Image: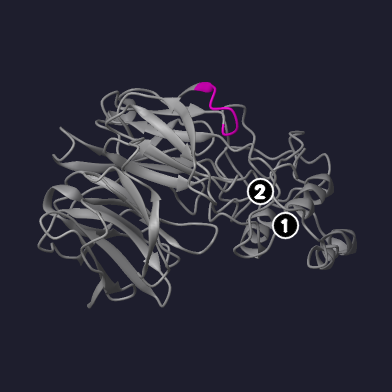
Amino acid sequence: MRNVTGSRFWMWIGALGVVAGIAVAEARAAAQDLLVSSANNHTVLRYDGVTGEPRGVFVPPGSGGLERAQGLAYGPDGNLYVGSATAGTGPGTIKRYHGRTGAFIDTFASGGGLTGPWELMFRPDGNLYVGSYGDRRILRYNGTTGQYMGVFIPAADGDLGGFIFAPGDCLYVGNGRPVNNVLRYDAATGAPTGEVIPPGHGLDGPSFMAFGPDGNLYIAGWYSYNVLRYDPYGRFIDAFVPSSPRTLVNPMGGVFGPDGNLYVADYGGGRVQRYNGMTGEHMGVFVSVNTPFWLVFMPHPADFDADNDVDLKDLERFLACVTGPAIPYNPDALPPGCLMPSDANGRIAADFDKDGDVDQSDFGIFQRCFSGPGKAADPQCTN
């Protein structure tokens, strides 16, 4: 049971009113590490998010039965979810691993005929959406229990490409060969609402989709070796990463990093490439890795729900873990409602100063990190 009571606690928490007035510094170069799934090595590797230096194996080869590591996503619980499938497009499952240590937790989801889970995405409704590449469908699973909830998007007339939730409560889904367009669906019901991006402009085999810091939509072409840029509503802007000179061979997963630059899994080239997030200029090979499939940056230390900001939802999670000064928490019996898994040292994320309790000192650090909804937190705020 939590031991912080009385006016002293509420005086401390009352300082939250200060948070709204804090001008959070603009995010500087990121200290968040990059995770890369290596399909042929059945593993997830970890790299320094600034230098690209290897930081070891995050999920060991075959951990928890992991095969052909594919899609990656952090869930609202702060843990890492990994798509696993025999032979790449064979029967698949979703594995769950500790978000900070990579330790295997469980096989979170399966069923529904899942084959080749190559993209995973949690929507604000809390549910998990998975691209089932082998049969070209998008399946939905309960984001808390992993229970199969049915087919959300049925197979179209082309290969399943990447997908992304878009403005206007829409879902954009890549429709690959032989069509090579992007279809639009209602994000709440899955009902088709037409074509948002027609064929053309050299797009062949749309793989990942990502919204950039400029609010525009970026789509990679598996067969066209490029990344095209569109406005949020599907109007073509330019070839952000052209196919000539060629720097990509079969681009798979891609993500804009905390530094604002674009990172792309160059599956065919065995590399992760980095591009200037404003100009598209090739900044060189960031890391070399065998069959890189998907990329994800580890969440900010204060982003407890892994939604790329530090806001009131994260504050709620912090408060659920409060113990008070010099009152240690038990990582095996955390306060009711505290959902933070402990790391290998028995510490939880809310314990910023790593002294075994969650108190005013930790709250002061959280205040520095508070950014508000949709705004990246200062990566140096916990220093």
Q: Earlier in the sequence, mark 2 or mark 1?
A: 2
Q: Circle 2 is placed at which residue position?
A: 302
Magenta stretch holds residue 51: yes
Between 155 and 179, the one lying in front of the other is 179
Q: Is residue 49 left or right of residue 239?
A: right
Q: At x 29% / y 27%, what residue is drawn?
A: 42
Q: At x 69% / y 44%, what residue is drawn?
A: 379
Between 197 and 8, the one lying in front of the other is 197
Give the image location of residue 202, x and y in percent: 25, 54
Q: Visible in this render: residue 191?
A: no
Residue that extends furthest to the front in the rendered view of this protein: 245
Under mark 1, the amino acid is Phe
Under mark 2, the amino acid is Ala
Q: Visible in this render: residue 371?
A: yes
Pointer 1 local density, CA inside 10 Å: few below 14, some 14–19, many at least 20: many
Q: Is residue 1 left or right of residue 240?
A: right
Task: Decide: is 118 above or below 375.
Answer: above
Mark drawn on residue 370: 1
Give the image location of residue 98, x and y in percent: 48, 37
Task: Answer whether labels 2 and 1 touch (C-beta < 8 Å).
Answer: yes
Give the image location of residue 322, x and y in percent: 72, 51
Q: Choose top left, top right, bottom left or bottom right for residue 88.
A: top left
The residues tagged by marks 2 and 1 sit, at their Cα atoms, a distance apart of: 8 Å
Magenta stretch holds residue 202: no
Q: At x 90% / y 59%, what residue is drawn?
A: 8
Give the structural element (helix, strand or loop) at label 2: loop
| Magenta stretch, residue numbers | 49-55
Task: Decide: is 125 above or below 322.
Answer: below
Give the image location of residue 383, x and y in percent: 77, 37
Between 313 and 57, the one lying in front of the other is 57
Pointer 2 local density, CA inside 10 Å: few below 14, some 14–19, many at least 20: many
